Image (cartoon, rainbow, N blue to C red):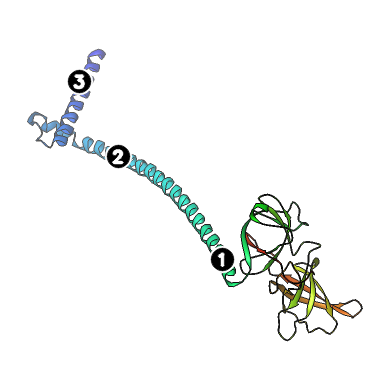
Amino acid sequence: MRRYKLQYWHLGIIAIALVLLVSWGANYLEIPMPRPFNFLHTVTAPFHRSVNWVGDRIGNVRAFFTQYRDFHEDRAYFEGRIAELERELSHAQEALQENQRLRELLKFEQRENFETLGASVIGFGSDNWSQTLIIDRGRRDGLSPRQPVITGNGFLVGQVQEVFSSTARVSMITSPGFAVGGIVKREESRALGMVRGTPLEEGLFVMDNFSWDADVRIEDEIITSGMSQYFPKGLAIGTIHTLKEGDYGLTQKAGIKPFIYGETIEEVLIILGEWGETE
């Protein structure tokens, strides 16, 4: 008897499955339900709706994960695109800044009567005390030692120290041992002194040899005096920040902050030629 009961259950399950398949097929194909199955379809309708509800929920979950995956794929794409555009913008900004600096160099060349040669800074001295720049111009470009080096707006950078075939080393005005004659730019003063690369305090360097009664003031601008065959007159050096007596009150000593102090120098001009008498 047990064996026959199992067979009846099997038949019942098969019948229910058949009704469900026919019902789903009719719904899917949008055709009327076959008449012999109408009663069973009515009886199994709640179960059929439950299965459809579960199927819809599963479909919704599946759609959610599909959308989630697509969202992350889109996000990864747009993040990569944003990074690419940021790199392009950075390169464009760098090119614009370089173009502006080169324009400043060109303006100075056109404004002054100096014969100049442009160069890019490609390196720095091997230690913090040397205060030197390495530029991409050398002997084959007509450079020679002691030629003055300036920025595009006329600020004195220093002087060519060593010349090689295609590069040169520039000693900056903040380098120990550097010296150049300076003069107060203010017309009422025109006091003469010597600007040196000797540190006085943070950011300031010595300008001495002012006479004790020279008309020198804080914030006076200092330019090259022109009393040298190596530096033309009028190159901007810096401004006076401190003043004190020197040599037992017989002279005055100033603390000069060079215009180039703390600035990043990327392009320079080398001035070719000689002027005046030896300093």
Tell me the distance, in whole angstroms, between the alpha carbons under discs 1 and 3.
99 Å
Location of mark 3 (residue): 11
Tell me: residue 89, above or below residue 35: below
For the point 21% across and 26% down, the residue is: 17
Pointer 1 or 2: first along the chain: 2
Q: Name the image quarter holding residue 216.
A: bottom right
| Residue that carries the numbered disc 2 in the rendered image | 59
List the residue tagged with mark 1: 106
Disc 1 versus disc 2: distance between alpha carbons?
69 Å
Q: Of 114 and 159, which appears nearest the observer? A: 114
The answer to whether the residue labelled 1 contacts the one labelled 3, judged by CB atoms less than 8 Å apart, is: no
Residue 101 vs 210, above or below: the answer is above
Labels 1, 3: front one: 1
Instruction: Kindly identify which numbered label has been placed on residue 1.
Output: none
Taking the spot 66% from the left edge, 56% from the top edge, the residue there is: 142
Q: Residue extending furthest right?
A: 248
**26 vs 268, nearest the viewer:** 268
Side of 193 where 269 appears, left or right: left
Query: What residue lies at 71% left-to-right and 72% top-to-bottom?
Result: 238
Asked if residue 170 lies left or right of residue 62, the reply is: right
